[in-house]
Image: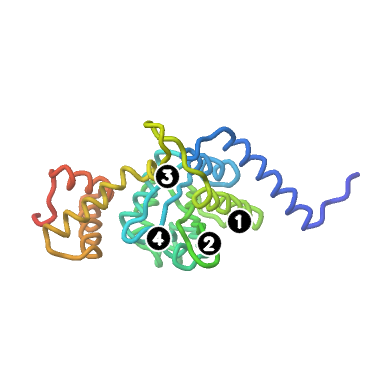
Amino acid sequence: MQAPLRSEEAVAVDAVKAIDVIAEVVRDARPGEIPARLCAVAVKLLPVVGASVSLRCNGIPVRLGASSAEASYLAEVQATLGDGPWRYASRAGTPVLACDLTSGRDVYRWPMFAHQVTAAGVQAVYSMPLGDDSVTVGTLDLYRDTPGELTEPELRRALLVAAVMTLALTALPREENGSGGREPWLGGLATEHDEVYQAIGMIMAQLGIDADEAVARLRARAFAQDRTALEVAHDVVSRRERLDVG
């Protein structure tokens, strides 16, 4: 009979298995495909139904990838509200685990966030910071459809995926563009969010306000209409909506 593994051996074996899964999923991927594929890895390795990765920016975070359309929507909900575990994880540089958004401490801490995500079928959210001890560049957000805590092995796997994601965001090479030149691969992922910042500029000009106030107005309009900030921004840029009326 094989002797049971010591705790440190078990940790090493689990890490090797997780790395094997990561390697398999990202094999042959172009740089721009890596964020979404790593989100898919997180769903394979953890008791979650979705994952998304967002880049920390002034104002509204930029979604770079997600494991599904549902996870993408949840990332946009967080960006629209401007609150939730991701905000605290990106500021503190440590994991923030909202293990039960149906009752108790997490609901009181983030009431509107809890209301929005539970309406979308999510009952727990775990936010992993991306970066190092000196700077946080974004978050990996994990969505679960039942309340529950992550076990120690699960948290280690989540942090491992976050570490690989950080490496991807900071160290992957440039890739070829259609004209034969080379361009930052992150640029293509953030294209639709360019409209958000264009809309913020338009709102600043229309209302004579600064960027922070313009972001707040955009979020307020989105929340009032039960839409995402990205959706409202698209209408502002296409001149179907003005925030100085209504």
Badge 2 local density, few (<14 within 10 Å), some, or many (20+)?
many
Q: What residue is at 48 percent from the left and 49 percent from the top?
A: 143
Q: Which of the two discs, 4 and 1, labels the residue nearer the N terminus?
A: 4
Residue type beneath disc 2:
Pro
Q: Which of the two discs, 1 and 3, labels the residue nearer the N terminus?
A: 1
Contact between labelled residues 1 and 2, with CB atoms less than 8 Å apart:
yes
> How far is the residue under mark 2 from the one under mark 1?
9 Å
Label 4 belongs to which residue?
84
Nearer to us of marks 3 and 2 is 3
Position of 42 with respect to 236 (left or right) is: right
Residue type beneath disc 4:
Gly
Residue type beneath disc 3:
Pro
Badge 4 local density, few (<14 within 10 Å), some, or many (20+)?
many
Residue type beneath disc 1:
Leu
Rendering coords of residue 230 (x, y %): 28, 47
Q: Which of the two discs, 2 and 4, labels the residue nearer the N terminus?
A: 4
Q: Describe the element under mark 2 as helix, strand or loop.
A: loop
Label 3 belongs to which residue?
184
Rendering coords of residue 170 (x, y %): 50, 52
Label 1 belongs to which residue?
155
Rendering coords of residue 202 (x, y %): 16, 54
Q: Describe the element under mark 3 as helix, strand or loop.
A: loop
Q: Which of the two discs, 3 and 2, labels the residue nearer the N terminus?
A: 2
> How far is the residue under mark 2 from the one under mark 4?
12 Å
> How far is the residue under mark 4 from the one under mark 3?
29 Å
Q: Describe the element under mark 4 as helix, strand or loop.
A: loop
Q: What residue is at 38 percent from the left and 51 percent from the top?
A: 117
Q: Which of the two discs, 4 and 3, labels the residue nearer the N terminus?
A: 4
Label 2 belongs to which residue?
95
Contact between labelled residues 3 and 4, with CB atoms less than 8 Å apart:
no
Q: Which of the two discs, 2 and 1, labels the residue nearer the N terminus?
A: 2
**Image colouring:** rainbow
